[in-house]
Each structure stands twice: as structure tokens, then as C-alpha cells.
Amino acid sequence: MQQAIPYKSWLPLYTNNKPLISPSQLMSHHNNGGVVATQEVLKGSRNMSKMVQENAVIVFARRGCCMSHVVKRLLLGLGVNPAVYEIDEADEVSVLEELEMISNDGGKGSKKKVQFPALFIGGELFGGLDRLMATHISGELVPILKEAGALWL
């Protein structure tokens, strides 16, 4: 059986608060197999909201977390190639705060608690592993992914 090769569909446009100019510069900043380094994400954290909006499916995960691995494998098994951002323990709190601001629309509406692994589908917080598994088992996940533009079939 062939294994899907994950790829990164979105690359950070800003690192060290300077725009990247050439594709070779972009690839030199992004050469670790489709996973963006936490420092690059945090340095351009004002763009985190933009990253969530531009990608059909994004997984924010702790580095080396088994639950994050299950989320990635389930999505890859369905044919979705999610953007994956692995977070170090030292940066967890600041990333969680920022993700909560994004998921709560800057303070409007109800407060949503974000936990890792955090899955965003179609620019909105979908949930974690428990919600992903529940919707997959009930058969509701594939239509949600199609609506978000993550699946074409």
C-alpha cells in the first residue's frame, strides 16, 4: 500500500519581520519536511490569523505529541494534506492565547477554549482529536472537509 506524502501548501511569508523575496530564500527558511518552526510562526504572529484563514485545514500541535500524530494520520488517510505547525513547550502559552483570540473573533461571541492538538477547518476552530474522531465515526467529517475545500472528490 502506498503512503501519502505530506506536503506543505503554505509557507510563511514573513520571518524576522522581513518579507521573503525569492523562492530560494523561501525554501531555505522552510526545509524541514513540511513543518514550520515555531520561532518562524511566532516572529510573524501577526500573520497567524491570516495563516488560519488561508489554509483549508491547519493543525497546531505539540512537538512529538501522540494525539497530534493521530490527527495528522487520520487526515492524511482521508486524502487531506493539512498544514502542520509544531509548537515547543516554551511557546505553548503564547500560541494558545493567540489561537483563542483568533477562534473567539477578537473577543466577540462565546469564549472557546483551545487545546492541543487544535484543528482549524475552513478558517474556524473545529476542535481537537475528540471532535475529529466523533465526526469521522458519524460520517460527518468528509462533507465538512469538502465544504472547506480540503477534499475534491
Image (cartoon, rainbow, N blue to C red):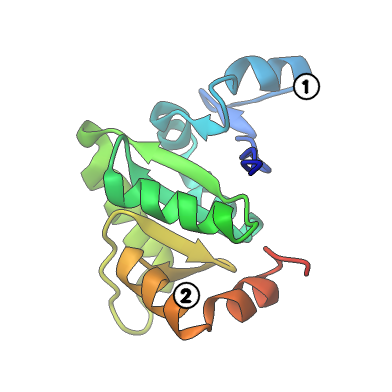
* Depth check, front residue: 131 or 58: 131
* Depth check, front residue: 58 or 140: 140
Q: Position of residue 103 (x, y in %)?
A: 40, 68
Q: Which residue is at a point 71% across and 67% down the rendered structure image?
A: 149
Residue furthest out toward the front: 1
Q: Which residue is mark 1?
A: 23
* Depth check, front residue: 31 or 78: 78
Task: Count the marks.
Answer: 2
Element marked by disc 2: helix
Q: Residues within 10 Å of mark 1 (few under 14, many from 20)?
A: few
Q: Which mark is residue 136?
A: 2
Amino acid, disc 1:
Pro
Q: Position of residue 8 (x, y in %)?
A: 63, 39
Task: State whether residue 30 appears in this view.
Answer: yes
Q: Which residue is at a point 47% across and 75% down the rendered structure image?
A: 136
Amino acid, disc 2:
His
